[in-house]
Image (tube, rainbow, N blue to C red):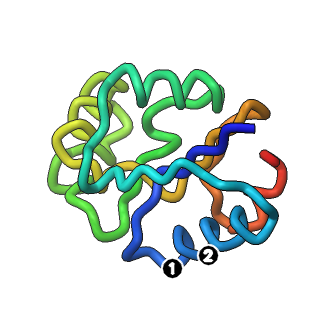
Amino acid sequence: MTVTIYHNPLCSTSRNTLALLEEKGAKPVIVDYKSVGWTRPQLENILAIMGARPRDILRVKGTPAEELGLLDPACGDDKILAAMLVHPILVERPIVVTPKGAAICRPVDKALTLL
């Protein structure tokens, strides 16, 4: 089974999720999204798997979300996605994707449902 984790090594929840995946025998593909960034098709694919909208994966804490006007309820999906491409930190972490689905793994145990 292919397991991918969109990982921020500076985040303890992300590190703990990665450790849990490895403890359970997964050998995840690790994507340091802050370093490599996102593509629009990549985000759209993850959102489709999750059945979610960009606002559902928008990270606010420690990001420029408020300054960019992304918290305004009138802010549309296209504007949020465009901002996520410029500021990868705007995407909540960690996101784990497997053939069983995709999820933001907060809390860490949520990753177990994808294995």
Q: In this view, does 96 lie above or below 75?
A: below
Type of amino acid under label 2 = Asn
Q: Within 10 angstroms of label 1, few (less than 14), some, or many (20 or more) residues?
A: few
Residue 67 in the image, given as x and y percentages of width and height:
16, 55
Of residues 96 and 71, the one drawn nearer to the viewer in this rendering: 96
On the image, numbered disc 2 is attached to which residue?
Answer: 16
Disc 1 secondary structure class: helix
Residue 57 in the image, given as x and y percentages of width and height:
48, 45
Tell me which corner region of the image, top left, top right, bottom left or bottom right, holds residue 35. Answer: bottom left
Alpha carbon distance from label 1 to label 2: 6 Å
Type of amino acid under label 1 = Ser
Q: Residue lying at the far bottom in this picture: please name it.
A: 12
Q: Residue 12 carries which label?
A: 1
Of residues 8 and 44, the one drawn nearer to the viewer in this rendering: 8
The answer to the question of whether label 1 and label 2 lie on touching residues, with beta carbons closer than 8 A, is: yes
- Quadrant of the frame with the N terminus: top right
Left or right of 67: which side holds 70? right
Q: Residue drawn 16% across and 41% down? A: 86
Q: Residue drawn 83% across and 50% down? A: 113
